[in-house]
Each structure stands twice: as C-alpha cells, then as structure tokens.
Amino acid sequence: MIRLIYYVRAFVVSVELLLLGLSLALFNIFHGYFEANFLAISFDEEAVRWAAVLPVGVAVWTFKEGVGVIFPDEKTSKSLHEWPDYWKLKVHFDIGIFNNFFYLLPCFVVWFTGALDSVEGAWVFVTFFGALLVNAFSFYKAKIVIRSLLLRVNV
C-alpha cells in the first residue's frame, strides 16, 4: 500500500504536471489573445509534416538513456540495487517511463489528426512536448546525480 501511495505521489507531485496545469491556466486566461495572434502566423507545411519527429526523438532518447538511471554500469549497478531505498528510485523510473508515453501520445494525436494548424492543437502539442522535455531532463539529471553519489561512496 505504501508503494502505491508513493507511485501516486511521484506522479502528482511533479514539475511536469505543474507545467501542464500552468499551461492550461494560461491558455484559458489568454485564449483570445493567442487565437488572434496564431492566425497571423503561417507555418511551413514541411515543418508541420515533420513536427512529430521532435517528441518521438526525445521519447526514444529517454527510453534509451533512461536505463542508465537504474543500471549505471556493470560495476556499480549491484551496489545501487542493494541500496535500501532503491525501490523509491525504481518508482520514479517507472513513473518517468509512463510519463514518456503519457506526454508523447497527445503530441502524436495532434500531429496525426492534423490539428497542428489550430491554436488549440498547437498549444497541446507544444505543452506536452515541453513536459516531455522536462521528463527527459529529469532522467539526464538523475543519471548525473546517481553517478556522482556512487563515486562518492567509492563503488
């Protein structure tokens, strides 16, 4: 039960969800302004066609590099897995991987349905791509912190 509560806490108390909430609030407050200015922007059709490559690329990088969070290398992974609070690290890893799918899906749906040419679609795409970038940065930072801690304990 404690682990389930920790999973929920790790998902809800996150920079990514704060970003999504802030983005929703800003969109609701300034919707008219965004819509008026969005119509004045013309997008290159080729760029819109390839827009999905960005979030997919970030998601693939996170999947590839994220494994290094729980398996830093052959020499130190054993010590990390024997750490008493390893389960908390694993919870954050699992949530991060889930978030990768959770944030990638709206980007892909907006792109696939052709909604990038609407202010709402573009806003959803940019917001969830931003959350995906924050998620990827979290994995990057976690790898650095874990390597630093393992070096400090002379593993």
Image (tube, grey):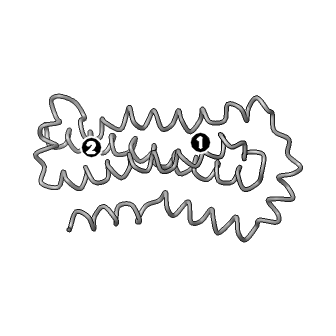
Contact, CB < 8 Å: mark 2 with mark 1? Answer: no
Q: Picture coordinates of residue 23 (x, y %)?
A: 62, 62
Callout 1 secondary element: helix
Query: Where the N terminus falls, by quadrant?
Result: bottom left
- The residue lying toward the viewer, choosing from 34 and 49, is 49
6 with respect to 11 (left or right):
left
| Residue at (25% x, 49% y) in the render | 90
Q: Picture coordinates of residue 153 (x, y %)?
A: 14, 43
Amino acid on which the number 1 mark rests in the picture: Phe
Neighbour tally class for label 2: few under 14, some 14-19, many 20 plus, Cα within 10 Å:
some
Q: Quadrant of residue 145?
A: top left
| Residue at (18% x, 51% y) in the render | 86
Pointer 1 residue: 108
Callout 2 secondary element: helix
42 with respect to 99 (left or right):
right
Q: Which of pointers 2 and 1 lies earlier in the amino acid sequence?
A: 1
Q: Mark 2 or mark 1: which is in front?
A: 1
Residue 30 sits above or below residue 106 on the image: below
Q: Picture coordinates of residue 34 (x, y %)?
A: 79, 59
- The residue lying toward the viewer, choosing from 109 and 56, is 109
- The residue lying toward the viewer, choosing from 51 and 81, is 51
Q: Picture coordinates of residue 29 (x, y %)?
A: 73, 71
Amino acid on which the number 2 mark rests in the picture: Ile
| Residue at (70% x, 51% y) in the render | 121
Q: Give the residue at the far front of this rendering.
A: 113
Residue 17 sits above or below residue 107 on the image: below
Pointer 2 residue: 146
Q: Give the residue at the far right of this rendering.
A: 40
Neighbour tally class for label 1: few under 14, some 14-19, many 20 plus, Cα within 10 Å:
some
